[in-house]
Image (cartoon, coloured by chain):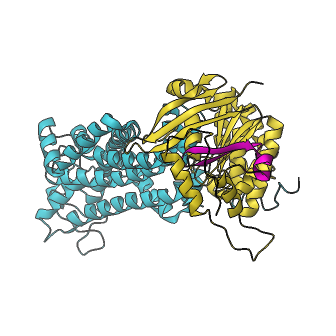
């Protein structure tokens, strides 16, 4: 099976200071695979997502590498080519459902927009499809939700609407940019399950951006751990948790709060690990070179 | 799948939705001021039928008759007459014609011109935005009264030059505010969502941004109507508006000013009409804002 998405040595930097944002990032995604991107804030997770979608902020310049989607380099497609692909082959589940819906338009027209423009449905067909999509994401009263404005729905509801609208386009790839971060914990779990179910039904590949290893464990098949724009470890999820190779990964796993032991203190990522990471970044080290693996 | 559903997942407050008109009427301010403006429009349209006298007919025998409830008032002249014996009420009713035309036509044209340029500036950005914004800056540096007097002087007095003067002066208000609002909206996440849906720029401008800017534009428009009424009155007051065979409130105020000591009613009634009209437009703007804004109306 050939790769659906193949990112090759992608590098990017801030235009103003030449500070690298992505360093030689490579990852491949098979059809139907859910690939997690984990890392702390500023590690470059969202930058990768935005590079795939072609919505990198003005301040960031790609300095090298390719983003191949079915063999086509997205970075060379240009605005017009991208527009043809977005919404048809690639869709986004955004981070903050509270702001990602247009406040002055009803849910119905917002879901129908994509269906009409990208799937070529008539208004009537699009309306029926939107209704069944809302049912598919377990919304009890889709008729009412269709008529609602976004502010009349809860955060979890809005995220369901956005999930319905992303999967409804039947794209081959969905970028989920921290889709649960803005939600409270009980809702998070429902939404994760929902994404997994939808992914199963629609056979979609997902790039799942998150800073939460717990989320990764629940939903991803493979995972890339990022630090300062660099992939420090990449493996199957089961392997990652059973046998983490990189000191930073181990530290991240250890830093997860333990719900089974309320008395356990939190474990921060230790300075030694971070210092080693920086030594690695500043040196000439290419990916796969030996990194010091001391965990204090 | 019990885990995925949630019984609390019902949309709150989504009732059988009343239409826009019903929402406006439910807002007392908008309803009252809208009623006043409607009344004004009715007066303007049916002026020849409603006015008890010919507003231009002079009769020096009937000069400066006080309103009917005062000593010396004549029953046929409800609000009295001016120094030339013309009926004040009839002149007021006919004066509403100019007021209404100026309010609606001039304000709408200023709104269209300014909002269009504002949308373009805010959305296109770059050099286009620069050019339009600098033009607005330069434009606003002119003293508005001087500019309007100058314009009317060049174009010649008349209804069309008053309208042109108002449009030329006041489009900048719309342009500035709309541009700023478009910039605000363009930064919002839902624009990114639309981009990742592969929507074109024009579609995004009209389907995503415009609906969010529209309530603001409508509010500005009603405020501008009030301003247009005042500007017309000022131009009439200084004698630069319409020829004297069409009564205007501003013109009446100017005439009444000279005889304020012995016939105050000639000045006061058009003043009240002007005041109530402008107040109604301003209140309507405020009421509409509440009725139209999807978030405020929750």
Residue B51 horizontal side relative to residue B82, left or right: right
Quadrant into which the C terminus of chain B falls: bottom right
Q: Position of residue A277 (x, y in %)?
A: 56, 52
Q: In which quarter of the image is residue B223?
A: bottom left
For this orientation, the residue located farthest to the bottom is A263
Residue A284 lies in the magenta-colored region: no
In depth, the one of A250 and A27 nearer the eye is A250
Instruction: Examine the structure image and report whether residue A236 is included in the region drawn in magenta.
Output: yes
Residue depicted at 54% across the width and 30% down the height: A65
Q: Residue B115: percent from the left, percent from the top?
A: 37, 42
Residue B277 appears anywhere in the view? yes
Residue at image position (60%, 63%) is A270
Pick the front one: B46 or A134: A134
Residue at horizontal 51%, vertical 60%?
B290
Looking at the picture, tell me which residue is in the foreground, B43 or A66: A66
Q: In this view, does B62 lie to the left or right of B225?
A: left
Along the viewing direction, whichever of A285 and B82 lies nearer the viewer: A285
Chain cyan in the figure, letter: B
Task: For residue A54, say whether it is visible.
Answer: no
> Where's residue A193, x and y in %?
80, 51
Residue B85 in the image: state x and y as whole percent.
18, 57
- In the image: residue A54, left or right of residue B134: right
Q: Residue furthest right?
A: B1
Q: Give the range drawn in magenta.
A: A220-244
Count of numbered marks:
0
Tell me the yellow chain.
A
Residue B71 in the image: above or below residue B37 = below
Quarter of the image holding residue A220?
Answer: top right
């Amino acid at each position: 099976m050939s790769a659906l998405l193949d990112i090759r040595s992608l590098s990017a930097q801030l235009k103003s200071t030449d500070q690298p944002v992505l360093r030689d990032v490579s990852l491949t995604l098979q059809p139907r695979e859910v690939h997690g991107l984990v890392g702390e804030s500023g590690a470059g997770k969202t930058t990768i997502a935005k590079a795939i979608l072609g919505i990198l902020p003005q301040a960031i310049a790609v300095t090298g590498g390719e983003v191949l989607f079915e063999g086509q380099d997205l970075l060379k497609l240009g605005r017009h080519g991208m527009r043809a692909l977005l919404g048809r082959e690639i869709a986004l589940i955004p981070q903050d459902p509270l702001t990602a819906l247009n406040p002055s338009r009803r849910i119905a027209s917002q879901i129908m927009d994509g269906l009409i423009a990208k799937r070529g449905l008539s208004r009537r067909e699009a309306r029926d499809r939107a209704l069944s999509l809302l049912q598919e994401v377990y919304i009890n009263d889709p008729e009412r939700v269709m008529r609602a404005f976004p502010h009349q729905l809860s955060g979890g509801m809005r995220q369901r609407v956005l999930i319905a609208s992303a999967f409804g386009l039947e794209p081959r790839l969905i970028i989920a940019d921290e889709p649960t971060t803005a939600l409270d914990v009980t809702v998070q779990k429902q939404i994760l399950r929902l994404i997994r179910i939808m992914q199963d039904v629609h056979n979609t590949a997902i790039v799942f951006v998150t800073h939460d290893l717990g989320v990764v464990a629940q939903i991803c098949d493979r995972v890339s751990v990022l630090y300062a724009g660099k992939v420090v470890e990449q493996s199957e999820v089961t392997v990652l948790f059973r046998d983490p190779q990189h000191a930073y990964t181990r530290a991240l796993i250890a830093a997860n709060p333990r719900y089974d032991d309320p008395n356990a203190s939190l474990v921060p990522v230790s300075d030694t690990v971070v210092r080693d990471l920086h030594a690695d970044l500043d040196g000439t080290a290419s990916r796969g070179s030996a990194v010091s693996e001391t965990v204090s | 799948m019990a885990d995925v559903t949630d019984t609390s997942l019902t949309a709150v407050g989504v009732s059988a939705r009343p239409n826009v008109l019903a929402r406006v009427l439910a807002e007392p301010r908008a309803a009252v001021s809208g009623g006043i403006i409607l009344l004004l429009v009715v007066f303007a349209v049916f002026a020849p039928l409603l006015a008890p006298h010919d507003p231009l007919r002079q009769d020096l025998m009937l000069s400066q008759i006080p309103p009917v409830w005062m000593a010396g008032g004549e029953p046929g002249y409800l609000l009295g007459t001016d120094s030339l014996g013309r009926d004040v009420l009839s002149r007021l009713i006919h004066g509403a014609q100019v007021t209404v035309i100026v309010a609606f036509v001039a304000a709408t044209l200023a709104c269209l011109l300014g909002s269009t340029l504002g949308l373009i500036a805010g959305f296109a950005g770059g050099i286009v935005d620069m050019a339009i914004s600098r033009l607005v800056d330069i434009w606003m540096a002119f003293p508005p009264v001087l500019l309007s007097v100058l314009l009317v002087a060049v174009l010649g007095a008349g209804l069309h030059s008053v309208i042109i003067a108002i449009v030329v002066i006041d489009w900048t208000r719309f342009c500035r505010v709309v541009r700023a609002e478009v910039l605000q909206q363009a930064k919002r996440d839902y624009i990114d969502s639309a981009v990742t849906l592969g929507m074109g720029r024009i579609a995004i401008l009209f389907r995503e941004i415009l609906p969010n800017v529209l309530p603001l534009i409508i509010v500005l428009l009603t405020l501008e109507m009030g301003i247009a009424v005042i500007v017309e009155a000022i131009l009439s007051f200084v004698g630069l508006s319409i020829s004297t065979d069409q009564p205007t409130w501003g013109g009446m105020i100017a005439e009444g000013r000279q005889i304020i000591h012995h016939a105050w009613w000639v000045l006061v009634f058009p003043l009240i009409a002007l005041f109530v009209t402008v107040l109604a437009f301003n209140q309507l703007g405020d009421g509409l804002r509440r009725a139209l804004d999807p978030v405020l109306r929750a």
